[in-house]
Amino acid sequence: MANIKVTITVTATVPTIPVANAKVSLFKADDHERVEPAITTKNTDLSGICQLEIAPGDYIILAEAFTVFSQRENTFEEDETLAFVNVPLPLKVAVKTYKNGTVQEITFCDDGEIVDLDAIVESIAVAGGAGVAAVGVIDPANNDYAWLLTDGSLLDLPPQNNSKVHWDTTDIAGINKATATITDPNGASVSPSAGINVREGAFSQQRRSEPVNVSLRRANIDTTDDQALWVAIRNRTNAISFNAYKDFIDRVLCNDDGGLNEGLLEDAQKTNPRRNDARLIRQNKELYTSLHGVGAYELLKTATQVFLLLECGVAIEEMNRYTGKPLFKASDETTRLGKNIPLTELQNLLTRYLGSNQLPYIQTIIDNAFGGFNPVDSIFCSGYLLARANCPPLLELIWSYWHEEAMLAQTMNAIGLRFQNRRGAAVRDPLAHLEIAPLFPINNLLWGHIQEEQQRLSVPRRAYEYNHHYGLTLVGKAIPDFRPADARSKFLEAYHHLLYLCTVFYKQDDDTTVIADGFPVLNALKEVHLLLAEGAHNQFGDLPWTARAEMLTEQWILSRPEMRQFLLSRHMVPYREGWMGQVDTMKRLQGWTDVTVTHFNELAIYGEQILLAVRYGNWNIETDPVRAANWARYWRPEIQNYIHGYRAVTGVELRAEPTTNQQRELITTLPTLLIQQRLLTGKSAPALPAPMVTDTAKSFRERRASRRANSG
């Protein structure tokens, strides 16, 4: 049987502090006499922690510190991290009596015994002696005593750097023997005249001379099993980010010998034995000898599909399997979760949350709607697809929507027109300088991209799906007659209401005198969850995947150094992804929105993560507000960044309390209308009505025709 890892923390009972260099020994539980030597022995580090590797079983843990022993029994069946062993701190008291400067007697007091110094001093006076009393507290660092005379003088002081025992001497000089003061290792003041009890509870608190720092902290946060799903969402969305995708494509298709990196795909095939990438390898080898046709773009599309297949899913991985770059940062998760949960424990928590390899939300759907169907592996058989039930891709269409609003697709369309030597609607062509020589590899990729136009998703198809998922749509000549069959008209209001309630929750949660109420957030989560579920039909399984793959390839093409050279994008702007500068440059050339693509990119990334956590959580049957409170705390950076990005793009502040009709109308107005309004007026949009989508498109066309007529 394989060994398991056990982490044991040794603390002192009074005060509760980690004990460094404590000796921890493990014995078999049936060996109570401990005749046999210990199974393993190890000392704790400066944090009071030691890690042991043992076989599963029953053990007796023996901890030795300050010459004091403490033991307990424990059963270890799997990796365990929070096994505490408490050792009593040897807080001892002794009394010295002096006469004429000579020590007459030293009395050691038992644990719990009260020492009345007044009585000791009185007995010395009755005997006719001129001596004084002294009291000492053991120094755990060196097992020695530090003495304090009741006349205010000090003897045998411990070193100044000793943090175990602190002596408060500020107010001692000049006071009489009946009011002498010492402090115990906890920092509490002790009055000899009131009696000294070795146990912490009997110490009487007195005024301290130095200031005392008092602080409040948030109540303990209960761990819930769905937190592992949120960690998995961040882990997987980071794994399929553009930078990870670009690194994958560059390594697979652009290695030194000009061919496909077969080692990477062999590793991928070991991870998923059902995959067969031999065709991809053969395509690249054949393409390397031919530089004409659409083969290069086809290969890029295939590699993009491979990337998404490898990285999408419900999992938590420590690092990128190819580059070694971290995907999991323990410090980030500790801040979000409110406690330190190791990676292995989070993975185990995710396994328990998934149960039978299915998210509880999906299991609920299968039990209620697909009870009469059997799971199938083949797409040609009757039943429900087991692969989609067990491993849903963690990607959301809102990522594509915000990149569409950022003019990503329009940028590629403009470049495609110029590549075909076609001029746009403007009198002067802003891309007149764009000439791409056939010697550049990007020339062939653009040719393939244009030739594949009929096979790619059209703007209307994406627009209808945006409307079906979220009630969002696009405005422009590409969709002149927009007639959706089923729209989520209530989604935008519900989603923005959820974000607003989160900001209210954060204000309460930051006040450590208040326990924030998670019920309003829970109810808002249920509302948004149901609206998302209603839109998860028809093209839900394939269109978001296809849109993501196509936009990733467009981003990769735009990130090429040749494209940066042709468009003359700015070099000193700290874009987080290589394609973003080219889109901003195109927007300036074409006179589109002047809001930087960075804000749209943040809305896409953070919006996707927020909605994934809402969509795949089992919120509809949840009644515990603790889960909703944990959700709001965990996603606080994403929610606040999304709110900021939305204000930067649309001019609408989602933090504002929707008490006026103007604010209620603004938060329900389609973002595309707000963006258009800012483009036309150059300032934030006023309160706009929420018109029907068809009327909106018509009014925009009429306004554009009016502007052209006036300019003519």
Image: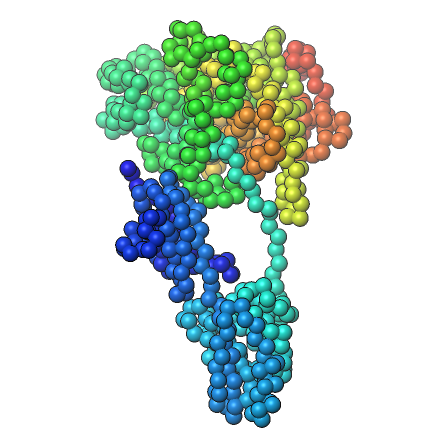
Name the residue nearer the viewer: 497 or 205.
205
Quadrant of the drawing holding the C terminus: top right
Residue 80 pos. (x, y %): 40, 43
Left or right side of 450 for 337: right
Q: Is residue 112 visible?
A: yes
The relative height of residue 320 versus residue 374 in the rendered view (above or below) is below
Name the residue nearer the viewer: 327 or 75.
75
Name the residue nearer the viewer: 684 or 561.
684
Residue 9 pos. (x, y %): 42, 52
Residue drawn 31% across and 18% down? 274
The relative height of residue 168 versus residue 639 in the rendered view (above or below) is below
The relative height of residue 448 versus residue 611 in the rendered view (above or below) is above
Residue drawn 63% across and 23% down? 527
Left or right side of 207 for 549: left
Left or right side of 563 for 38: left
The relative height of residue 255 versus residue 129 in the rendered view (above or below) is above
Residue 173 pos. (x, y %): 60, 82
Q: Is residue 601 visible?
A: no
Q: Quadrant of residue 200?
A: bottom right
Residue drawn 23% across and 26% down? 257
Q: Residue furthest right?
A: 660
Residue 662 pos. (x, y %): 74, 27
